C-alpha cells in the first residue's frame, strides 16, 4: 500500500534528521542549541510543505531552512555573534574513530578555527556532498565564491595540519597507518 | 654632495618621495628598495600583470572572494577529505533522540486533524 503524501513527507523528514543535526552542530555552539534548531526546521518545513516541489532536492531545501533559522536566531542574539567565527564548531566533539585520537583532535581543532563561511562551505561540499551550485544557492552566493571558500578552507586545514601542498608531510602516525591501509 | 642637493623639492613634499634622487635616497638605509617601491606604486603606465583583473596579489589586496587558489596536492586533499568524512560521519551516526520522532508524529497528527 502506498503511503499517504503526508506520511511520505514525514518519513523523508525523519530520514534527514541526522544530516540536519550534523549540520546544525557545525553551526551552533551546543548540542542543545543544535537540536532546537533542527526542531524549528522540522516545524517550519512541515508547515511550509505545500511550497516544496516534489522531486526537488529535499535535503537542500531543509538545509536552507535550517541555515536561515540559524541566521535569524543569530541576529536576535548579537552577543553570540562571535561564536560563529570560532567557538561554534569547537564543540564538534565526536569520539575518535579509526584515526588516532590526536589526529582527530588536531583536525577538529583546525576545522573549528576556520572562518564560519569556509567551514560551512567545506561541510556542505566535502561532507554532505552537495554540488557547488546547490551549496551556492543555499548560502546565497556565487558558485565561484563557494569554490573559493572550499579551496581556502582546504588550504587552511592543510597548512594547520602540516600538509602544505608542496609535499605531503605525513608527520602523524595515524595518517600514515591509514594511508597504508588503503 | 652640495648642500643645495638636500633641499626637498616639491615632489618630495607632496608625494612623500623624491622623483629624482636629489635627497640621496640611494645612500640611505633601504634607499634603493624604497625608491623602487614608490616608483612601482606611482607608475600608472605599467601594464596589469595578471590579466584584465590584475595579478593574484592585486586581487588578494582587494579582498576578491574568487581569487585563484594554489592547488593542494592530491594526497593532502585526500587526507583532508578522509578526516572530514570521519568527523562528519560520527556526527551523522550519533543516536537520534526520540523527541524528533515524537515531534514529527505530533505534526503529522495535527495535520490529519485539520
Image (spheres, coloured by chain):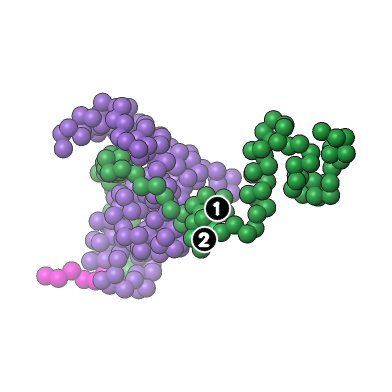
- Residue B12 at what x, y percent from top left? 79, 46
The residue depicted at 38 percent of the width and 67 percent of the height is A47
Q: Which residue is mark 2?
A: B53
Q: CA distance from mark 2 to mark 1?
A: 8 Å
- Residue A23 at what x, y percent from top left? 36, 50
Marks 2/1 in contact by CB < 8 Å: the verdict is: yes
The residue depicted at 75 percent of the width and 46 percent of the height is B20
Give the chain ID for the purple colour.
Answer: A
The residue depicted at 27 percent of the width and 44 percent of the height is B74
**Chain where mark 2 sits:** B
Range shown magenta: A1-6
Drawn side of residue A72 relative to residue B21, left or right: left
Query: Sequence order check: which comes first, mark 2 or mark 1?
Result: 2
SS at badge 1: helix
Residue A24 vertical placement versus A164 (above, below): below
Instruction: Point out the residue furthest to the left here.
Output: A1
Amino acid at each position: 500500500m502506498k503511503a499517504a503524501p503526508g506520511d511520505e513527507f514525514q518519513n523523508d523528514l525523519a530520514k534527514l534528521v541526522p544530516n540536519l543535526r550534523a549540520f546544525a552542530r557545525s553551526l551552533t555552539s551546543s548540542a542543545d542549541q543544535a537540536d532546537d534548531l533542527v526542531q524549528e526546521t522540522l516545524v517550519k518545513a512541515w508547515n511550509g510543505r505545500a511550497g516544496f516541489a516534489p522531486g526537488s532536492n529535499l535535503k537542500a531545501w531543509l538545509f536552507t531552512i535550517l541555515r536561515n533559522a540559524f541566521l535569524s536566531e543569530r541576529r536576535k542574539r548579537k552577543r553570540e555573534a562571535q561564536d560563529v567565527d570560532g567557538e561554534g564548531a569547537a564543540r564538534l566533539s565526536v569520539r575518535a574513530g579509526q584515526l588516532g585520537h590526536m589526529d582527530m583532535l588536531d583536525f577538529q581543532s583546525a576545522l573549528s578555527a576556520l572562518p564560519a563561511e569556509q567551514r560551512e562551505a567545506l561541510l556542505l561540499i566535502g561532507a554532505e556532498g552537495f554540488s557547488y551550485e546547490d551549496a551556492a544557492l543555499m548560502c546565497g552566493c556565487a558558485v565561484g565564491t563557494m569554490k573559493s571558500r572550499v579551496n581556502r578552507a582546504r588550504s587552511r586545514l592543510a597548512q594547520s595540519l602540516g600538509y602544505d601542498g608542496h609535499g605531503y608531510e605525513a608527520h602523524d602516525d595515524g595518517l600514515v597507518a591509514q594511508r597504508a591501509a588503503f | 654632495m652640495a648642500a643645495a642637493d638636500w633641499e626637498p623639492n616639491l615632489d618630495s613634499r607632496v608625494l612623500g618621495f623624491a622623483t629624482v634622487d636629489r635627497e640621496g635616497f640611494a645612500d640611505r638605509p633601504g634607499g634603493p628598495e624604497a625608491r623602487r617601491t614608490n616608483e612601482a606604486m606611482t607608475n600608472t603606465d605599467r601594464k596589469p600583470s595578471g590579466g584584465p583583473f590584475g595579478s593574484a596579489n592585486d586581487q588578494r589586496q582587494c579582498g576578491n572572494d574568487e581569487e585563484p587558489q594554489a592547488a593542494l596536492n592530491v594526497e593532502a586533499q585526500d587526507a583532508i577529505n578522509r578526516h572530514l568524512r570521519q568527523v562528519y560521519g560520527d556526527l551523522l551516526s550519533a543516536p537520534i533522540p526520540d523527541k524528533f520522532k515524537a515531534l514529527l508524529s505530533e505534526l503529522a497528527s495535527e495535520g490529519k486533524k485539520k
